[in-house]
Image (cartoon, rainbow, N blue to C red):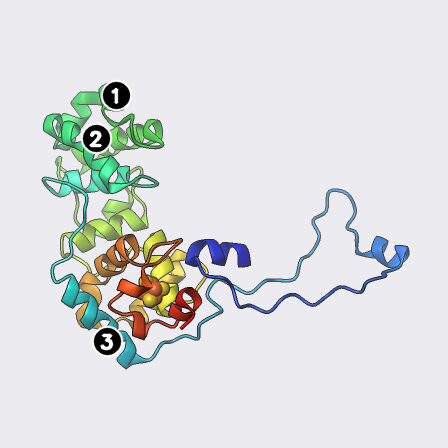
């Protein structure tokens, strides 16, 4: 998990090293520690990701973080192209493990011929695959997009349902996709936790949980209500352009003096 923490947050862990093992364990003692074939050994639980910075964070510091992010990004929006709620759902579903730029390249041609569930269904999997073949996992995504289009036509009158339960019931649409859609359309102040949001939240001490779902819960507990509708965008864009995974641009960061991780990267 320590390695995982470092991968996700990009910061060298300050967790203390595990206690040294006795140097000269006897053969008998070693044998006693070795699990029988087929049984997994019981490893001690490691500290979860984010055990480095205390939580919850100071309220004034959190407020100031969002005041400043809103100052440099007053009207943040998704960078995915879409022309209606249905195409937003499709674009977000296609963006899993892919870049927004790559998805936009593919959807430009796709949405020109299929911007409704009815048209998508008529296009079919065979027609859809060549249009999205540049996107990772395109075969699975094509299957899901067509299955979702069928469900929308059969159950929702050919319209994208704008509530979480119905969205998440669509093939290929999970909690994160539904959150992005509902947040982007201003229906719910959801915070979808992707790799950028996860990393930035940890570095800023806004969350210290080990899973995206738990980080999402923590963010809802500490982000002031007034900032919630756009918090997802600010965190994702800050992570995408400034607080980069490998080499965060702390010197150009407008919240560097509010960031408990700055010293890890700048040494000050
Ligand atoms: S100072 Fe800014 S760029 Fe650097 S780790 Fe903190 S939030 Fe990220």
Q: Quadrant of the C terminus?
A: bottom left
Circle on res. 106 = 2
Can you identify the residue that label 3 sits on?
63
Q: Earlier in the sequence, mark 1 or mark 2?
A: 2
Q: Position of residue 222 (x, y in %)?
A: 31, 73
Distance from disc 2 to disc 3, alpha carbons, whole Å, reads: 38 Å
* Contact between labelled residues 1 and 3, with CB atoms less than 8 Å apart: no
Question: Spatial distance from mark 1 to mark 2, Cα to Cα?
Answer: 10 Å
Asked which quadrant contains residue 231, the reply is bottom left
Question: Residue visible at 44% across and 75% down?
Answer: 54
Q: Is residue 62 left or right of residue 245?
A: left
Dot 3: element: helix
Residues packed near mark 2 inside 10 Å, few (<14), some (14 to 19) or many (20 plus): some
Q: Which mark is residue 130?
A: 1
Q: Is residue 35 left or right of residue 24?
A: left
Give SS at disc 2. Answer: helix
Q: Is mark 2 within 8 Å of ligand 1?
A: no
Residue 154 in sight from this viewpoint = no
């Amino acid at each position: 998990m320590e390695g995982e923490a470092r991968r996700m947050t990009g910061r060298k862990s300050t967790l203390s090293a595990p206690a040294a093992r006795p140097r000269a364990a006897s053969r008998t003692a070693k044998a006693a520690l070795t699990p029988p074939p087929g049984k997994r050994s019981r490893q001690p639980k490691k500290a979860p990701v984010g055990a480095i910075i205390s939580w919850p964070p100071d309220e004034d510091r959190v407020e100031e973080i969002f005041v400043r992010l809103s100052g440099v990004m007053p009207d943040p929006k998704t960078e995915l192209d879409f022309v209606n709620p249905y195409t937003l759902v499709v674009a977000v579903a296609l963006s899993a493990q892919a870049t927004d730029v790559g998805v936009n390249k593919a959807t430009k041609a796709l949405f020109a011929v299929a911007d409704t569930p009815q048209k998508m269904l008529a296009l079919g999997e065979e027609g859809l695959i060549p249009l999205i073949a540049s996107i990772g996992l395109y075969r699975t995504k094509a299957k899901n997009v067509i299955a979702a289009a069928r469900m929308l036509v059969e159950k929702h009158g050919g319209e994208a349902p704008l509530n979480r339960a119905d969205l998440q019931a669509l093939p290929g649409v999970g909690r994160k996709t539904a959150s992005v859609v509902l947040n982007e359309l201003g229906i719910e102040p959801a915070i979808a936790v992707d790799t950028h949001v996860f990393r930035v939240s940890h570095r800023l001490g806004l969350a210290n949980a080990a899973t995206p779902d738990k980080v999402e819960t923590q963010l809802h507990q500490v982000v002031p209500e007034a900032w919630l509708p756009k918090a997802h965008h600010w965190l994702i864009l800050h992570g995408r352009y400034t607080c980069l995974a490998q080499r965060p641009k702390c010197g150009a960061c407008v919240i560097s003096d509010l960031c408990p991780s700055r010293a890890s990267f700048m040494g000050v």
